[in-house]
Image: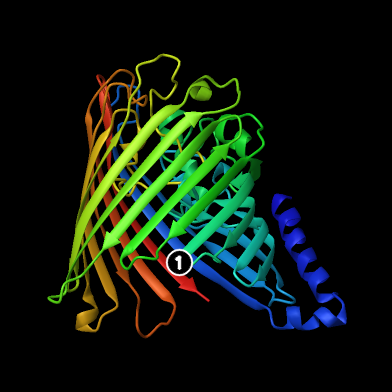
Amino acid sequence: MRHTVRLSLLASMMVLSASAADDLAGMFNEGKVSGQFREFSISREVDDTRPAANNDYTRRANAVGGYIKYETSAWSGVSLGAAAYGTFGLFLGDRTNVNDVDPTLLGRDNKNDVYLGEGYLQYKNGNTAFKAGRQKLDTPMAGSDDARMLPNLFEAYVLSNTDVKDTTLIAAHVTRFAQGTFGRAYTNGVLSATSGYSLVDSRNQTGDFTDMGKYAIGQNTDGVSAVAAIYSGIPGLKLQVWDYYAHDILNAIYAEANYGWSYASGVAPYVSAQWINERDVGSNSVAAVKKVESDFIAAKLGVKVASFDVSVAASHNTKDSDADNGTHGGTISPWGGMPAYTQGMVTRHQFMAGTDALKVAASYDWKTFGINLNTGVYYTEFDMDKLNGYSTNYAWTAKESGFDIIFNPQTFKNLQLRLRANYADDFYQSSTGSVSWDEYRFIANYNF
């Protein structure tokens, strides 16, 4: 029934478009269909040494899906768009077995799913643009986090303007959040909230456009209002500042500076810095966010030499021993925002209270050999404080390493093949045991 209702809504939009007045005919006749077909396979070999756990097991999943989108051309600056998203599992066996089937490729209850993920009106006039409705957002603290089959989506009203030279100004109000499939990796609590998702159990909210507060903390709020300024008027320099006011939850400020330059020898260094400041606002009855007080700082230094790119990044998150601070000073990001330089492919412990993190990465672009291939490796380390909130009053060091291979065949335009792996060492640890794994992913994306 859920699929029928959502597909019927998309079909109704198309019918309404086709029956528009004659003076709007060109708006729809010149519209475009686009989309992405995705195949995703994942396999995780888990080593769980906790006494009550199932010890060693392998969790797998295969799925196909993606999205198909229709967008009209502009008429007097106005255009409309709609997109259906879907995921369909393949060769899964018993979908109810949580140790056999990876949930991050599938919809609620590990079922197939189809829904209207985008449905918006857009208006452009000169240097001003306005977009209202269901849409995809990619901002530092609220984003699509398209790490598995389907991305996070939003119901929002976004106004942007570029009248000021080299500057983009943005004002937005976001009312609802539709979790993508990656959010199903988390249940609730500090691990989830510091990794980009909800403090409450949201495993079965994939594709549902839920009130921003209801999704984040289990209570309805007036959404999230945001303003931003992005400046790039100095060669090699980009500055951005965002302020997110999550009504009755918190105010988050994100600031970032990136600067890169090059020498005649072809050596191109770059440096970056970021800061996230969070403080509680308004009123709610959720203990974990009644007091929010955190600061996250990070820096990154890298250099590009010919086809090589090597970088090192470090970060620190504050901590707070006050019992009223439910996250003990951790940085929460419940709407898919994950901008940290030190995050791993899976391990995102850098936002937990008191964590010091380090990441080293290197990549090589093989285009000089006439191949559309990019290969990369990385290593991350997270020095966890006992106030981290994930493992009660226990400090340890979590590690993750991995590789990423991206190939775009020259003979098959718009196709991307990707092989990724991550090796998590002590993702979780306590006095009674730990959780580690080896994970492999194969992804094929075809854009049209």
Callout 1: SS: loop
Left/right placement of residue 271 relative to residue 117 reads left
Q: Nearer the viewer, residue 307 or 248?
A: 248
| Residue 257 visible in the snapshot | yes
Q: Residue at horizontal 62%, vertical 47%?
A: 174
The front one of 163 and 446 is 163
Please tell me which residue is depicted at 59% across the width and 69% down the height of the picture. 127
**Residue sitting at x 37%, y 24%:** 389
Q: Position of residue 254 (x, y in %)?
A: 43, 44
What residue lies at 40% left-to-right and 82% top-to-bottom? 412
Crowding at label 1, few (<14), some or many (≥20) Cα neighbours within 10 Å?
few
Please state the horizontal and vertical placement of residue 88, each as a whole percent of the image: 55, 58
Is residue 334 shown above or below 148?
above
Where residue 319 appears, as percent x and y from the top left, is 33, 25
Q: Quadrant of residue 262?
A: bottom left
Front position in the image: 200 or 53 = 200
| Whether residue 287 is situated above or below residue 279 in the rendered picture | above
- Give the residue pinned by disc 1: 166
Q: Position of residue 164 (x, y in %)?
A: 52, 64
Q: Amino acid at mark 1?
A: Asp
Q: Above or below — where is 371 with respect to 257?
A: below
Identify whether 373 is placed above or below 441: below
Colour pattern? rainbow
In the image, is 225 to the left or to the right of 94? right
